[in-house]
Amino acid sequence: MNNKPNLELLSIVIPARDEEGCIASTVEHLHLELKLHGVPHEIVVVDDGSKDRTWAILQEVRERVPALAPVQNKAPNGFGRAITCGLDVAKGDALVIMMADESDDCRDVVRYWNKLNEGYDCVFGSRFMKGGGVIDYPSIKLFVNRLANAFVRILFNHGLNDTTNAFKAYRKTVIDGIRPILSPHFNITVELPLKAIVRGFSFTVIPITWRNRRTGEAKLKIKEMGSRYLFICLYVWLEKYFSRGDYRSEQ
């Protein structure tokens, strides 16, 4: 499988909005885990217009975590815009998108890095396959999640059962190959993997774990996102069936 250049640097992009209660521990735990496993890395935390002390805390943490590279996403804000901002400034040839609230397991970041180094273009985590799991997932959100992912799976017939999860890994060549990125909000979580699959980049799926946030407030508002998810799914579906492969990777 490994006919790709060796990876030299992992950039972890973390969008953060009003995460003063957890951002320091997220960065410190992640940095420690990657350091213990010898993963060369930078941690790009994008402050997406926080009204609390998130930015000030990042400046404090930067003094003791040299791998931290905080940036501010100026208005207009939005989850997708913050991720795009982080991808734009990231220096790594491998990228992981991770949440700021410690819901994603930093040990899985190491597993992503190792899988990318096997030669895959993308590594997608699934919380709903054998070996994966969720802890304290709100029942209504879980129901909507499984319904939405079943819809996407049928629409694209791609075999991935956790498309909507943001926590995924890509080679930089993939991110360059799926631009322009359109989604300003949480619909970026489906735009990136679906474009990567439709454009012919290789991927593998591994089990991951997820834990509900222990501090702060969830930013995803389900009632606001339905039409945005549908738009981006249909946009990429049209590309798959009507672009005649104009955007497919030549790898």
Image (cartoon, rainbow, N blue to C red):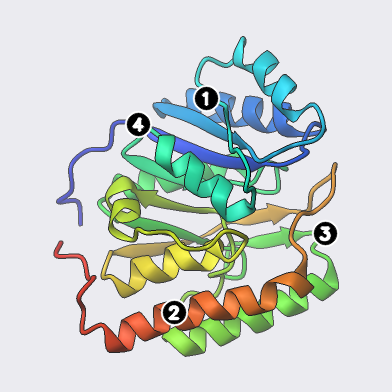
Where does residue 33 sit, x and y in percent of width and height?
Answer: 56, 29
Residue 158 appears anywhere in the view: no
Q: Is residue 116 above or below residue 12?
A: below
Name the residue located 50 percent from the left edge and 21 percent from the top edge.
67
Name the residue located 64 percent from the left edge and 46 percent from the top edge.
99
Q: Nearer the viewer, mark 4 or mark 1?
A: 1
Where does residue 41 sit, x and y in percent of width and height?
Answer: 43, 28
> Is residue 129 found left or right of 210 in the rendered image?
left
Residue 19 appears anywhere in the view: yes
Q: Considering the image in quadrants, where does the N terminus appear? A: bottom left
SS label for mark 1: loop
Q: Which residue is mark 3?
A: 136
- For the residues labelled 4 and 3, the Cα–Cα distance comes to 33 Å
Q: Is residue 13 above or below residue 140?
A: above
| First reached walking from the N terminus: tag 3 or tag 2 | 3
| Amino acid bearing label 4 | Leu
Q: Nearer the viewer, mark 2 or mark 4?
A: 2
| First reached walking from the N terminus: tag 2 or tag 1 | 1
Pick the front one: 190 or 122: 190
SS label for mark 4: loop
Q: Which residue is mark 2?
A: 235
Q: Which residue is mark 1?
A: 69
